[in-house]
Image: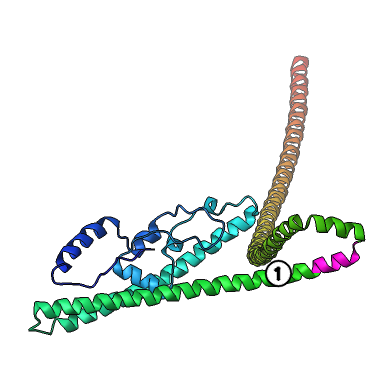
Amino acid sequence: FVAPKMDPATPSNNMALSSKRQTKSKKTEMNIEEVFASVSNVQASGLNPPPARTVLTPRSAESCLKHGINPEILRIRDLESFFDPNVDPAIQRMRHEAYSQRRHEMMGLVRAERKKIVNAEVAAGQGASGETGLTPGAILAAQSKANATFVELEEKRMLKMKKRQEKEIEQMLQFEVKMADIAEERERRAKLEADKEERRKREKMKRSKLLAEERRLKELRRAAMADAEEEMRLQKQRQMHSKEKAIQAEKEAKERALKRDAKLKEEERVKKAEEHRIQTQRILEQQQAAIKAKMEEMDAAEELRQQRIHEEQELEKKQMEEKRKAVEERIARNMKMAAKIEEKRKKEFHGSLVF
């Protein structure tokens, strides 16, 4: 990235240069938040894109320089920007995720450093506000000293960033050398097992084999990264599976508890319904028994009443028969008496005729 240049201030040039820089910086300078929100145009499969020509504001530039951070790694990169025809899509996706994670981590460092710089400037401004009697020349001298200090600080931090990059490159070279040593050992063992004809062919195709070896080393590195990433993915998947299994077990336990409670409630309801049915049946049986007893009592009373009526009818019939016999006897006696009287009258009549 490109930090704004700060030339040593002079009384004649300072104001003109300052006005030019302010006009230009308003158009081109970016702070770290704008860089963080912008999209990168870099197309590279690696995690460390080449530095871009980005003009930063003084505080943002100082924050990046202090930590040796390339502003380009703070920009947004989509998955397609990591495309490489020789790289597996899964590794491409994991590199994108690693870049995004590191991007947020680096942004946190830069934000914290920028906040420190702002706080320091505020504290310095508050201290300077108490001073009086400074001449324009003293102010220009102070500005020149500050600019020189900033340039020196920038050079130191550029050196720090360079050393950091050299250290990363050295570590990568060490890793590649180690992987090359492993590959060479495997190749040596393979050569010992090969015959003379195969050795002659390998000698003729030495250059192509070296290139193939480099590709194989890259593939081994990719495979190692893929294995590690796959193991991490499987571990996360196992953890998620265990968590889901625990949630499912808890859910099933709750469902079983609910079913058990529902079953107990249903059994209680059935029991109460059965008790109610038995009680109702008992009441109905008692009512039916009472009705039956009442009916039997009524039947017995009716039978007794009928028997009394029959006896009264028999008695009345007997009395009527006795009355009839008495009337018939009385009639018979009256007829006999009438016959006797008639006989007596006849005798008296005949006797009168004789005399």
- Residue 208, above or below 131: above
In the image, which residues are magenta?
186-194
Residue 257 on image: x %, y %? 65, 65
The x, y position of residue 119, in whole percent, is 28, 78
x then y, percent, for residue 211: 71, 57
Q: What type is the residue that disc 1 sits on?
A: Met
Mark 1 crowdedness (10 Å alpha carbons): few <14, some 14-19, many ≥20: some
Looking at the image, is 103 positioned above or below residue 309? below
Q: Residue at x 34, y 77 (%)?
A: 153
Residue 61 in view: yes
Residue under the image location 57 percent in, 56 percent down: 45
Q: Is 262 or 128 nearer to us in this picture?
A: 128
Asked whether the viewer can see residue 246, the reply is no
Q: Is residue 59 left or right of residue 279?
A: left
Q: Secondary structure at mark 1?
A: helix
Left or right: 297 as drawn, with respect to 105: right
Image quadrant where one finds the N terminus: bottom left
Residue 20: in magenta span: no
Residue located 33% across and 66% down the image = 3
| In the image, residue 188 lies in the stretch drawn in magenta | yes
Q: Nearer the viewer, residue 79 or 201?
A: 201
Q: Residue furthest top?
A: 353
**Type of secondary structure dominating the magenta stretch:** helix
Vertical side of 120 occupied by 172: above or below:
above
Name the quadrant containing residue 30.
Answer: bottom left
Q: Which residue is mark 1?
A: 179
Q: Is residue 197 left or right of residue 143?
A: right
Quarter of the image for residue 245 reads bottom right
The quadrant the C terminus occupies is top right
**Residue 352 percent location from the top left of the image:** 74, 18
User: Could you say which is closer to the camera, residue 195 or residue 328?
Assistant: 195
Quarter occupied by residue 344 = top right
